[in-house]
Amino acid sequence: MNIKVLSLFPEILEAYFSASIMKRAVGKGLVSFELVNIRDYAYDKHRKCDDEVFGGGAGMLLKPEPLDRALAAAGSPEVRTVYVTPSGRLFNQAMAADFAKEENLVILCGRYEGIDQRIIDTRVTDVVSIGDYVLSSGEVAAMVVIDAVYRLVPGVISGESLSEESFSAGLLEYPQYTRPEEYGNMHVPEVLVSGNHAAIARWRLRASLIKTLAYRPELLQTIDLTGEIGRLLKEVIDGGGENEPRAANSGGTGKN
Ligand code: ADE
């Protein structure tokens, strides 16, 4: 997979692309990255890329001409082109998996108040937000999208690690423990050291349900609750036993 990132500040992304697993994936020839400076496609002698918003309003917008030329050179819109902006469709694991199927992907980072709508209408295939908050830099959002996508390219990470993680089955991942088995006066749940793989799988599914119910109950609306999962969920809702796995801060607001 080749990922091209169009940005006015490509240096923000440089360090990220030369880091760890990313470097290994590039070394193995599984993914390649290219940074494109939008300013290199500006027409005028000042290489101006932004301008005021028609109709008034605060801030500046990225002008259409440099973006149009940079995106055309990157193969857009025939190549899947993702524009990251807070006013997009909410990014999730399913979208990441969908993008990971592409041979080529273009990511466009916005700046200031955003970009001229005509570019979105003609060159962008996917308008994506990484969450309901506003970042000062589209580059940070682009890094989030790229990171979620490239690790799903076959061969980058083992399939087993991927199938166990949060969202892969529509649930949050169960709690995990490592040595020592006893820390302070806290013990690792007994079932996890029992060697009984069926019991461990049941405990993990139950723990995932409890955690999802506590932190992200809306996720339960999107999964099939007819079989074992539905039965376990009912059990959990009807009242768990004393040794039930718990989700930390489950009643909280997220504020500490
Ligand atoms: N740029 C600024 N904020 C963003 C967000 N939440 N998602 C995507 N791009 C952004």
Image: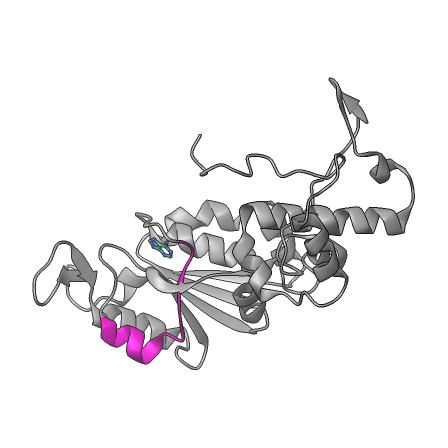
Q: Is residue 199 above or below residue 180?
A: below
Up-down relation of residue 222 to residue 171 (above or below): below
Taking the image as shown, residue 39 lies to the left or right of residue 71, namely left
Q: Residue furthest right?
A: 195
Quadrant for the C terminus in the image: top left
Q: Residue at x 77, y 33 (%)?
A: 178
Is 128 within the magenta?
A: yes
Res 240 → quadrant: top right
Residue lying furthest top: 184
Q: If the picture is divided into quarters, which one holds ligand 1?
A: bottom left
Measured as percent of width and height from the top left, residue 172 is found at: 62, 51
Count of numbered marks: 0
Q: Please say whether residue 27 is one of the residues in the magenta stretch.
A: no
User: What is the span of residues highlighted in magenta in the rendered image?
Assistant: 117-131
Instruction: Where is residue 194? Give x, y as percent.
Output: 90, 38
Screen quadrant of the N terminus: bottom right
Judge from the rendering whether residue 239 lies leftward or rightward of residue 43; answer left or right.
Answer: right
Name the one closer to the observer, 8 or 43: 8
Residue 29 % position (x, y):
64, 63
Between 146 and 222, the residue placed more toward the observer is 222
Front residue (pair 97, 11): 97
Q: Residue furthest front?
A: 238
Q: Residue at x 43, y 50 (%)?
A: 13
- On the picture, is 128 further left or further right than 2? left
Q: Is residue 92 visible?
A: yes
Residue 218: x, y in percent?
Answer: 52, 57
Residue at x 11%, y 58% (from the top left corner): 57
Place residue 160 in its image quadrant.
Answer: bottom right
Any part of residue 109 in sight: no
Residue 243 or 3: which is nearer the viewer?
Answer: 243
Residue at image position (84%, 34%) is 190
